Amino acid sequence: MSVKSKNTDPTFYNSLDESEKSAWWLFEAGIKDRKSYFHTPVVVSKTKTGTVNPRTMVLRAVNRSALELQFHTDKRSNKINEFAVNKSGAVLVYDMATKVQVRIDAEFRIIDDLAILEDRWSKMKSMSKECYAVSKPPGAELENPINVDYDVDGVSNFMILSAKVLQLEWLYLCYKGNRRALFDYRTEQPVKSWLVP
Ligand SMILES: Cc1cc2nc3c(=O)[nH]c(=O)nc-3n(C[C@H](O)[C@H](O)[C@H](O)COP(=O)(O)O)c2cc1C
């Protein structure tokens, strides 16, 4: 499936079901496609004082039937502390190539199941593993950026962050007329509606 503009309208243009499918497909394809903006969504948490904290993260896995996106991170990082206090957050992507923006309200949780973490860790490249072996936690002050101490292994700092999608908003920009749709997964049957763009 492709959502790149052609002369004909994309299949999702006037279809809620196809728009929803395309949103999930873009995330799935974004795991491997480093050029897609769906590869690096913005993940937003809330701070203790109620402000929001956005950061870019690499999308690592998608489970469409469980309505779940997964990211890798360091368990010592701010975001993990913030999601432990307030599990509500957001995910945002705008992909210029497809002219699609997706906004997600999500409930975040930390996956700390040892078997799952070890399996994921075993599939990671050593360069990615190295980030987790830095002795000081992410965000700690450094006197000199050249002098960074490493522990032997970073696996104990490695965490999977899961975002359960509660609501997904789709926006497709098109010169013939934009399309905006809302997919609400909080009810047993998802509620799908068109919105004024
Ligand atoms: C392209 C890109 C990809 C990134 N991917 C990740 C990631 O997958 N996991 C992660 O924890 N941080 C990632 N970061 C770093 C975060 O944006 C952020 O700076 C870091 O996690 C600290 O955030 P925090 O203090 O809010 O926890 C990435 C940054 C960029 C620019």
Image (tube, rainbow, N blue to C red):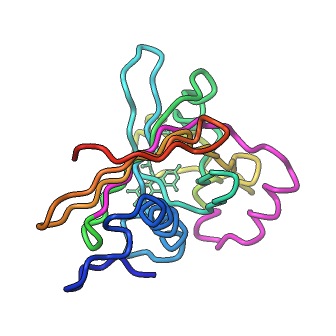
Residue at horizontal 78 percent and vertical 43 percent from the top = 112
Corner quadrant of residue 50: top left
Q: How many discs mark residues in the rendered view?
A: 0
Residue at horizontal 23 percent and vertical 43 percent from the top = 196
Q: Is residue 65 above or below residue 73?
A: below
Query: Is-magenta flag for residue 109?
Result: yes
Give the residue at the far top of this rendering: 49
Residue 195 picture location, percent across and down: 30, 44
Left or right: 137, with 18 as reference point: right
Left or right: 35, with 189 as reference point: left
Q: Nearer the viewer, residue 122 or 89?
A: 89
Q: Is residue 32 above or below residue 70?
A: below
Q: Is residue 161 above or below residue 152?
A: above
Residue at horizontal 63 percent and vertical 53 percent from the top = 132
The magenta span reads: 100-129
Q: Nearer the viewer, residue 102 or 14?
A: 14
Left or right: 86, with 116 as reference point: left
